[in-house]
Image: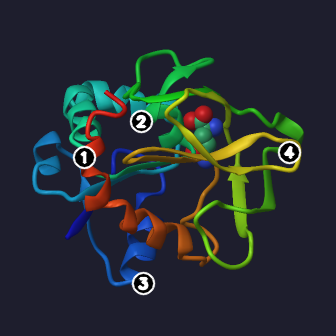
Amino acid sequence: MTTGILALQGDFREHSEMLASIGQASVEVRWPEQLEGLDSLIIPGGESTTIARLILRYGFTEPLRAFCSSGRPVWGTCAGAILLAKRVDDLDRPGIETMDTSVARNAFGRQVDSFEADVAIKGLAGNPFHAIFIRAPIIESVGAGVEVLGQLEDGAIVAARQGNLLATAFHPELGGDTRLHEYFLTIGAAERPKAGAGA
Ligand code: GLN
């Protein structure tokens, strides 16, 4: 089983270190052809406009959409959650547009560009997840097929799942808590009948 990490820009390395720490093999994905042999995929945080530009330039748009509708697990973290969303407030070119979410970029304003919060995540045993937000987006609303997994105290949605698709507004690869990566790896085969959920 191998997890791909889209490595066009952003913090793909931290994800691969986190996966290695729980014994999961990963590869850095730089070309669409590499998607073929993968069992799951992470789209990391970074700068969503830059990653969107590189997705277009390297011909990733359709292969990434096909990967999402194949039913294999795909997890977008921060900029990755922006790229997965069908609706984004200000992204100047198309992302993957597959998850039935509306996302606002840089939703926390300049004065709190970065902050940390403990977020209870549905499906994670134990304490709330200590989440690191860096110029983070908010998931403003979700469609009927999307389950909200985590919210801030004011109700802002920061984690959601639609079948094989997972989105978190924060950076789970920073901070040393491996539970969300472990959760992601459990999505796997049981979700495959729902292939196409985000197509
Ligand atoms: N603000 C970034 C964007 O809109 C996302 C930040 C991040 O991934 N940490 O692309």
CA distance separating discs 1 and 3: 30 Å
* 1 vs 2, front mark: 1
Tell me: is circle 3 under 8 Å from ligand 1: no
Q: Which comes sooner in the sequence, label 2 or label 3?
A: 3
Of the four image quadrants, the one with ligand 1 is top right
Percent of width and height locating residue 158 = 67, 46
Percent of width and height locating residue 59 = 20, 28
Q: Which comes sooner in the sequence, label 1 or label 2?
A: 2
Residue type, mark 1 in image = Pro
Residue type, mark 2 in image = Ile
Disc 1 packing (10 Å; few <14; some 14–19; many ≥20)? few
Q: Which comes sooner in the sequence, label 1 or label 3?
A: 3
Q: Which residue is mark 2?
A: 51
Q: Marks 4 and 1: in contact by CB < 8 Å?
A: no
CA distance separating discs 4 and 3: 31 Å
Whether residue 4 can be seen here: no
Residue in the image at 64% along x and 52% along y: 170
Tell me: is circle 2 under 8 Å from ligand 1: yes
CA distance separating discs 1 and 2: 30 Å
Whether residue 81 can be seen here: yes
Q: Which comes sooner in the sequence, label 2 or label 4?
A: 2
Q: Where residue 112 is drawn, which disc sits there? A: 4
Residue type, mark 4 in image = Val
Camera-nearest residue between 28 and 82: 82
Residue in the image at 46% along x and 51% along y: 44
- The vertical placement of 38 against 2, above or below, is above
Question: Looking at the rendering, which quadrant does residue 13 occupy?
Answer: bottom left
Q: Where residue 193 is drawn, which disc sits there? A: 1
- The vertical placement of 93 against 74, above or below, is above
Quadrant (top left/top right/bottom left/bottom right) for the N terminus: bottom left
Disc 2 packing (10 Å; few <14; some 14–19; many ≥20)? many
Disc 3 packing (10 Å; few <14; some 14–19; many ≥20)? few
